[in-house]
Image (cartoon, helix red, strand yellow):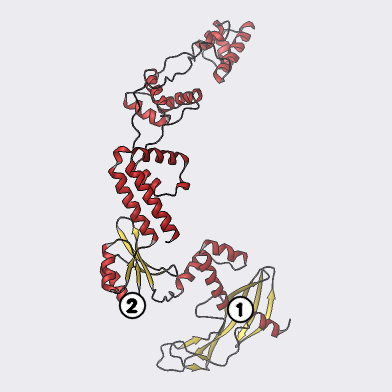
């Protein structure tokens, strides 16, 4: 490969750099180059110097080639400054289009990473750069963004002013947005009249101000841009409407709940009585049957009860009960079935609450514990599980509509309501004619607002 071709491939942006050799390895391409200019200007005083002090090699990352990392080993020279009053005795020359002060990348790679960081930010940009054989950390990409100069925005013709929370309920700031381009123009540290007025006075040319109902912003615009027209955007228009609807619903909140039905006893909920038959399956039942068979087999072989206990690892009284029972069912009947429970006095209350639709074991446990239940939550969980298995179609009670719920249903598009919400809203509007009229006005305004007429 000729030197001119190498020069054109890697260092075509710099006229004062010459490529000497090229080293290609499995994962890296190293370009050996040197500066060729005869002079350099001091970065402090600008004096051009030709006196060379020394030289050294700078290693710069460049754009990858064939998915190989490219490193430019550039020999640069250090010059002596000829200006006696200059505080800088020596300085290093910079290759135009290739190097910059304290940089470990070429200017081309630096610009490419800045655009990558602006597009994808930290983690995503770092992963994409890794696939391009340009390893860079997410922190480095964020530093590249912070090092960029702030963009210069022209004074917007239509300015949006609104507040946002730095710490909700405590610290608020102001954001200024160009409504026509939908780009943020500036951020102000607070939302006081003096700060907003000062910004408007320093940036004349605002013709229309889009704001909310804040009195402080209204005063600031009146003082800082007295000729500007005050308007409200679509969001704040709808927010104002929603506030008015909420006040109307709040005045009729007593009519929102469904009228109480005639007093009826809750449907009886009872489980099937526990069978007194012996258990045929289960871990305990299987273990008792195995032990009974083993004890009687050893007893027939002539072993004593003490010897059987030592052989099977059972207590003497356990061996005596097993040996005295002719059939294992005698031991199973009544031992795990039909026993009384500390939950028995509270079961009628649990049945009543379950019939009313309250099927969450945790809440039922809290209720009966306040009534003196001494047991643990697990006992209630097991019993509620049995109730659910016995009554799988027990539906929970429908949640009562609140003021916020009704306001949301009225101000939302009818097609976006769930079926149950639409049904509840229909019932509420049938009970409260004033809210039905309000809903008609809201939907008529929404249609007018959506069509822009």
Residue 262 pos. (x, y %): 34, 25
* Secondary-structure class at tag 2: loop
Above or below for 281 versus 221: above
Residue 448 pos. (x, y %): 41, 57
Query: How crowded is the residue under tag 1: few (<14 C-alpha within 10 Å), some, or many (20+)?
Result: some
- Camera-side residue of 178 and 72: 178
> Is residue 192 visible to the viewer in this orientation of the structure?
no
- Camera-side residue of 257 and 449: 449
* Secondary-structure class at tag 1: strand
The residue carrying mark 2 is 204
Above or below for 381 versus 45: above
Q: Quadrant of residue 349 in the image?
A: top left
Q: Quadrant of residue 18 in the image?
A: bottom right
Above or below for 283 versus 32: above
* Image position of 122 (left or right of 168): right
Residue 172 pos. (x, y %): 32, 61
The residue carrying mark 1 is 73
* Image position of 349 (left or right of 18): left
Residue 61 pos. (x, y %): 59, 74
Residue at horizontal 30%, vertical 74%?
Answer: 227
> Is residue 8 visible to the viewer in this orientation of the structure?
yes
């Amino acid at each position: 490969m000729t030197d001119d071709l190498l020069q054109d491939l890697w260092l075509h942006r710099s006229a004062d750099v010459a490529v000497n050799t090229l080293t290609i390895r499995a994962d890296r391409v190293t370009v050996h180059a040197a500066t060729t200019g005869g002079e350099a200007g001091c970065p402090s005083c600008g004096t051009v110097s030709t006196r060379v002090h020394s030289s050294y090699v700078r290693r710069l990352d460049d754009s990858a080639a064939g998915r190989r990392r490219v490193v430019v080993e550039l020999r640069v020279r250090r010059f002596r400054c000829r200006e006696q009053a200059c505080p800088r005795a020596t300085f290093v020359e910079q290759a135009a289009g290739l190097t910059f002060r304290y940089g470990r990348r070429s200017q081309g790679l630096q610009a490419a990473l800045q655009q990558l960081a602006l597009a994808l930010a930290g983690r995503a940009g770092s992963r994409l750069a890794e696939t391009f054989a340009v390893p860079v950390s997410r922190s480095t990409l964020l530093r590249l963004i912070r090092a960029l100069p702030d963009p210069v925005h022209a004074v917007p013709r239509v300015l949006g002013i609104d507040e946002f929370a730095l710490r909700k309920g405590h610290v608020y700031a102001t954001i200024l947005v160009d409504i026509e381009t939908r780009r943020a123009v500036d951020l102000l540290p607070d939302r006081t009249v003096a700060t907003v007025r000062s910004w408007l006075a320093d940036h004349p040319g605002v013709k229309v101000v889009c704001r909310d109902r804040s009195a402080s912003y209204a005063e600031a615009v009146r003082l800082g841009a007295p000729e500007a027209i005050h308007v409200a955007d679509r969001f704040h228009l709808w927010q104002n409407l929603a506030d008015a609807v909420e006040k109307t619903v709040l005045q009729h909140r007593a009519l929102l709940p469904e009228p109480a039905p005639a007093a009826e006893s809750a449907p009886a909920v009872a489980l099937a009585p526990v069978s007194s038959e012996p258990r045929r399956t289960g871990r305990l039942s299987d273990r008792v049957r195995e032990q009974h068979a083993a004890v009687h087999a050893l007893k027939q072989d002539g072993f004593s009860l003490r010897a059987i206990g030592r052989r099977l690892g059972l207590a003497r009284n356990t061996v005596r009960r097993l040996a005295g029972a002719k059939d294992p069912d005698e031991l199973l009947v009544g031992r795990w079935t039909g026993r009384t429970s500390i939950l028995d006095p509270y079961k009628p209350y649990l049945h009543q609450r379950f019939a009313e639709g309250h099927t969450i074991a945790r809440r039922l446990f809290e209720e009966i514990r306040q009534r003196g239940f001494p047991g643990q939550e697990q006992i209630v969980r097991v019993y509620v599980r049995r109730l659910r298995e016995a009554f799988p179609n027990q539906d929970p009670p429908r949640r009562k509509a609140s003021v916020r719920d009704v306001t949301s249903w009225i101000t939302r598009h009818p097609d976006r309501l769930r079926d149950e919400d639409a049904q509840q809203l229909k019932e509420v509007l049938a009970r409260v004619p004033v809210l039905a009229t309000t809903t008609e006005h809201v939907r008529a305004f929404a249609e007018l607002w959506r069509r822009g007429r």
